[in-house]
Amino acid sequence: MAGGLGAGPASAESDDDWTEADVPSDVELSGTAISSHGPVAAGEGGVVLARRVTGWEPIIEVGPTTESNPLNDIAVTDDGRHVWFAGGSGVIGRYDVEAHQLTDYSAPEVEDEDGDTSEKTSTWEALDVAGDAGEERVVLANGSGEALPGELTDDGGVDWGTVIEPGAGTTITGVALYERDAGFVADSEGSVYETTDGGESWSEEGVYVAEVGLEDIAAAGESDATAVGESGFIYEYNDPGWDEADVGEETVLAVSRNDGDGLAVGASGFVYERTDDETWEETVQPAESDLRGAALGTDGFLDVAVGASATAIEQGSYPEGTDLPQTITLSKEVPAPIEYTLEVNGEIAALDADTEIEDGTVEGTLGNGDEHEFAFDGRIDDFEVSRGPLPQLNVSVNGLEVSPLRLSDREWSVVDVPIGSALYGAAAASSPIAAGEGGRVLRREDGEWYVVADDGPTGNESPLNDAAATADGDVAWVAGGSGVVGRYDLADDELEDFSAPMEMTSTWEAVAVGGDAGSERVVLANGSGEVLPGEYDGESVDWGDVVEPGGGSSVGGASFLDDATVYVSDTNSKIYRSDDAGESWEEIGIDGGSVALTDVAASDDDVHAAGGDGSTFRYNGAVWTKKAAADGELLGVDRRNDRGVAVGASGTAATRRLYGWEADETPTDAELRDVVLTDDFLDIAVGGEGTVLERDRR
């Protein structure tokens, strides 16, 4: 609860009066900090709120695990970009305010001082973080008096240190890092401990032991810290000793420090401010609820305190106009003009653009060589192009390149196909392919679908459950019931039979293809958890050894990243990766998973899996993060660049947008079994009763 010291945009004129703000969640708030985009707060039910120019709004509603565990503390990196929070049942999360990305680090597996390893699922009471985003160190503490240090790694994971009890198991109530490797913890027995080696060891030597239990601690430097506690006591550390101040009878619950400034809050809504002569004075009491978190505003942002009964009080004002904290830049590579409309739910101001702006909506035209830049606050609600090619736009949000398709909201439409039987798989070949019941294979050409195979590669009408294309799109493979496997050459319009490989006639549930046509690698997987790799040599397939990555759990999805790296998902909530095109496998998650995984899709940035409970799971190379994407069961997922779509039961569809996965409206109740994203910005979903949905993103 030390409060954040992250930097913000240029300052705005401030107001010295404390006022109570409206909060959109009726929950107890336990901590607050200042990110580079403004104040944030965390609390009951896993909610994380962000203060915008228009007020507070939720950015996370159910915590990092989607289980609604309470969050007890929140802190930010030195640059304010990464927001960390932790709480009940071992939950730990990090939110990137620039990329709008949540990462889950809950229940870390760590080693204690005795060398024993276990998952830490106890309740985290406090945390703090130091260092800039990407290089930060975090220290967490729990009710058992344990402190856990961790350092962010290059792959997005955390290198957790050893769990240490600085004291004798007394609840640690506050953590304050004044440098990346140095800081303090305070406990409920009145002790303060210091580390100078990043949390590997802690010392009480020379540190004051208070006469009352401590509730929080904040540090502005090596010899400049403040601890607060019961009976209105505030303790100031001025090396080598501590000075005591009594500000009243109410417990002081939280404190924030920034250079010489200080803010403390506590029971019954009391607020205390540090004066120029380093004394503490009680100020106006704007709320009566207990205040449990405090953060001094920096560089133009508000001072904030939060607490019980969804209480948030503020002092100061929010940046306006060109000082708004977020940015979006638009440019293009085509000579033709592009007319666009950009909508945000807050305020927006032009930094470098001659456009019309009204009520958060921009209408503009990009001419040859133009670049339009805006400062804004809140969320981008929509981005549409009324003239010109949307995919040819270059868009960056907060300095990060983003596909413009993740900002637009296009509708799905049902298209006519020449069959009425179910389609189970689709492939993004140079001409999209769909396959399904009765062994039928369909091809899309010039906007129309037609049948290229009526009864499958063997002619016995076995259903085809999946399809996949080579990297160059010249060939599509299909596989399904009774061991059927086929290779469709789009140029020759021929479906070649490779059924019953290695005399295996069980039902293939998934097929994946890596590499270009003529030398492609193929992976087949069945309901018994068996995976069969093969390599095509231009005429035949050299099939490898059958492997069971998951010991027999049914494999539902497979996806190549390149010609060697391939992933499979199974019904036991596990994902396996092979770096040798399927010859050997390594389990990469999902630890503690309980959801059947129906499909998997790999991209250069990350891996996504679809879950039977309507969730998607994102793997950043180190950890998995669950996200509730839709209400219905998800059965298929696809990724291309930074785009993503998932589909499932009863017409369910969800799209990966700028702020995460969001449910789509679709014009069908049919079960959607698979989805593909094409290079020419067409999304295609296939399913029951010959249903094909398309969405043109151009």
Image (cartoon, rainbow, N blue to C red):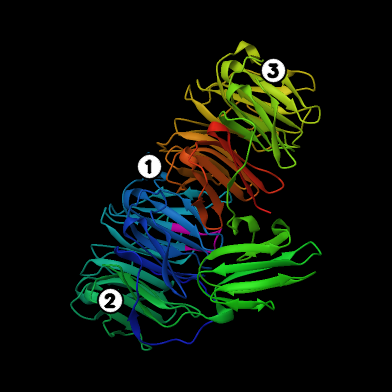
Q: Tell me which corner region of the image, top left, top right, bottom left or bottom right, holds residue 479.
A: top right
Disc 3, SS? loop
Say if 314 sits above or below 461 in the image: below
- Residue 234 got which mark? 2
Report which residue position mark 3 lands on. 498
Callout 3, which amino acid? Phe
CA gap, disc 3 to disc 2?
Answer: 77 Å
Q: Tell me which corner region of the image, top left, top right, bottom left or bottom right, holds residue 534.
A: top right
Name the chief secondary structure element in magenta.
Answer: loop
Instruction: Answer with mark 3 or mark 2, whichever residue precedes in sequence.
Output: 2
Instruction: Answer with mark 2 or mark 1, whichever residue precedes in sequence.
Output: 1
Q: Which residues are magenta?
A: 130-138
Image location of residue 630, percent across then percent down: 45, 47
Say if 515 sits above or below 304 in the image: above
Callout 2, which amino acid? Ile
Closer to viewer: mark 3 or mark 1 = 3
Disc 2, SS? strand
Image location of residue 592, percent across then percent down: 40, 38
Closer to viewer: mark 2 or mark 1 = 1
- Residue 603 got which mark? none
Q: Residues within 10 Å of mark 1 (few under 14, many from 20)?
A: few
